Image (cartoon, rainbow, N blue to C red):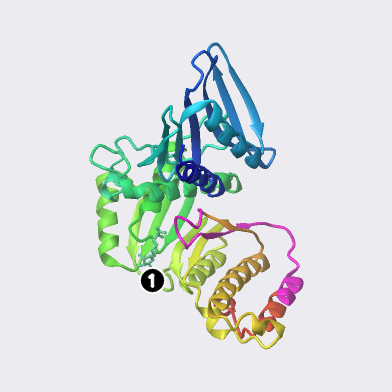
């Protein structure tokens, strides 16, 4: 087998594990025909918070399973390809990579479209479908699926993002268990991919009583979304033309603002806090407001003289302060990667969950002020709105 082909294959395997994109790997076409071992399937698993490779050895009459550390597993796969199997199929959510080896040990690689859209880390759990693709007219109308309801080639990332989003929202629902009707406002709803999917999931899959309003600046998008919602009978879903800043929202239970630029995210958080929303869910982008103010005169100045580092730091400080300000207003916060940075650069999510515990307001204010001082920041836009 030419080394470079094997190396490319193993490199792709490495990458798919690092990026959490490995759906499965199958080793097949045994070299020794009399061997009882027919094939080996390898999957990625989360076992007691550790990422492992699960090897399933399929014999003529039974299966055997073992879990190993990643590096040990990859070495094992390399050895198995040398000694026990001719072929290997690597299924990732990005692509399908097939390695074919002949008896003279010459190999070639074939790369094709992915057949998996998700990675299942817990193979004992039955995978739950949050929204159905079959007869799903809004996904079709929004250009995510084809005429026969299959995900379009270039829409796998979008579909993955929608599913991840619904999974996150589902995990937060227990904090709303006492609500008879959940009122949701999606600020900067855009084309409405996530808004339609959220309505479908909460109303049609979970049977919850809900009302969702999408607020969107662009009139054409609002009109299209309202026509679509009416056409498919999503009665409690509507879209309003307007700015986040000027929208009178009324009572909100869940405030959502995904990818609203710069201070529009602060305006949305502000509306959520003012309305005493139980959940505030934002995925910020284009954080510029703090960067403009950065004036670092301490020993870190020598690091932030580099524009790219200054920019990255400004994003961290902007979002970090948003989380601290939410805490000041009695929200428990979580900041995490929404979807792998491979799929979108706008991938940080901040979630605030309202609580009734006593808040150490002064302590939090002191923290906020000393961070601002450290970076020479005069004010954070969210603070200004709240004052
Ligand atoms: C990047 S898109 C995101 C759409 C959607 N939330 C998503 O994540 O798929 C941002 C949308 O917010 C809208 N938008 C930006 N600033 C806004 C504001 N201040 N008021 C209302 N809409 C705004 C834009 O017109 C655009 O459609």
Query: In this rendering, is residue 340 above or below 122?
Result: below
Instruction: Kindly identify the residue that appears in the image at 56 percent across and 56 percent down.
Output: 337
Position of residue 367 in the picture relative to residue 243 (left or right) = right
**Mark 1 lies within 8 Å of ligand 1 (Cβ measured):** yes
Query: In this rendering, is residue 378 above or below 344?
Result: below
Q: Give the range drawn in magenta.
A: 339-367
Judging depth in this view, the residue of 92 and 207 nearest the camera is 92
Q: Is residue 343 magenta?
A: yes
Instruction: Kindly identify the residue that appears in the image at 30 percent across and 49 percent down.
Output: 229
Q: Is residue 259 magenta?
A: no
- Does residue 249 appear in this view? no
Judging depth in this view, the residue of 148 and 332 nearest the camera is 148
Which secondary structure, mark 1?
Answer: loop
Query: In this rendering, is residue 149 above or below 65?
Result: below
Judging depth in this view, the residue of 221 and 261 nearest the camera is 261
Q: Dividing the image into 4 quarters, which one contains the C terminus?
A: bottom right
Q: In the image, residue 166 lies at what x, y percent?
A: 48, 46
**Ligand 1: which quarter?**
bottom left
Residue under label 1: 243
- Does residue 186 appear in this view? yes
């Amino acid at each position: 087998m030419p080394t470079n082909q094997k190396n490319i294959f193993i490199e792709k395997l490495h990458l798919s594990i690092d990026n959490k994109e490995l759906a499965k790997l199958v080793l097949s076409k045994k070299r020794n025909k009399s061997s009882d071992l027919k094939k080996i399937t390898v999957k990625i698993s989360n076992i007691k918070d550790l990422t492992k490779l699960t090897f399933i050895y399929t014999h003529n009459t039974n299966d055997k399973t073992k879990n190993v550390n990643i590096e040990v597993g990859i070495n094992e796969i390399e050895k198995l390809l040398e000694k026990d199997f001719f072929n290997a199929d690597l299924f990732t959510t990005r692509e399908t990579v097939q390695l074919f080896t002949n008896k003279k040990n010459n190999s070639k690689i074939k790369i094709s479209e992915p057949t998996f859209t998700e990675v299942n880390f817990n193979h004992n759990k039955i995978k739950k479908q949050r929204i159905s693709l079959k007869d799903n007219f809004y996904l079709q109308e929004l250009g995510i699926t084809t005429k026969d309801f299959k995900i379009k080639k270039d829409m796998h990332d979008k579909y993955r993002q929608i599913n991840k989003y619904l999974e996150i929202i589902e995990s937060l629902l227990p904090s709303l268990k006492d609500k008879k009707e959940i009122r949701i406002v999606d600020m900067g709803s855009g084309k409405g991919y996530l808004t339609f999917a959220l309505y479908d999931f909460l109303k049609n899959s979970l049977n919850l009583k809900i009302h969702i309003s999408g607020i969107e600046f662009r009139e054409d998008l609002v009109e299209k979304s309202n026509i679509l919602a009416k056409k498919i009978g999503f009665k409690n879903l509507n879209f309003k033309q307007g700015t986040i800043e000027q929208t009178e929202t009324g009572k909100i239970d869940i405030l959502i603002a995904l990818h609203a630029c710069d201070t529009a995210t602060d305006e949305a958080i502000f509306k959520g806090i003012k309305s005493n929303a139980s959940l505030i869910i934002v995925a910020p982008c284009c954080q510029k407001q703090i960067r403009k103010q950065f004036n670092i005169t301490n020993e870190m100045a020598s690091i932030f003289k580099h524009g790219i580092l200054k920019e990255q730091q400004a994003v961290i400080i902007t979002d970090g302060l948003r989380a601290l300000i939410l805490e000041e207003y009695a929200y428990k916060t979580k900041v995490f990667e929404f979807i792998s940075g491979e799929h979108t650069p706008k991938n940080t999510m901040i979630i605030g969950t309202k609580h009734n515990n006593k808040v150490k307001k002064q302590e939090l204010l002191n923290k906020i002020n000393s961070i601002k001082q450290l970076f020479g920041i005069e004010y954070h836009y969210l603070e200004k709105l709240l004052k």
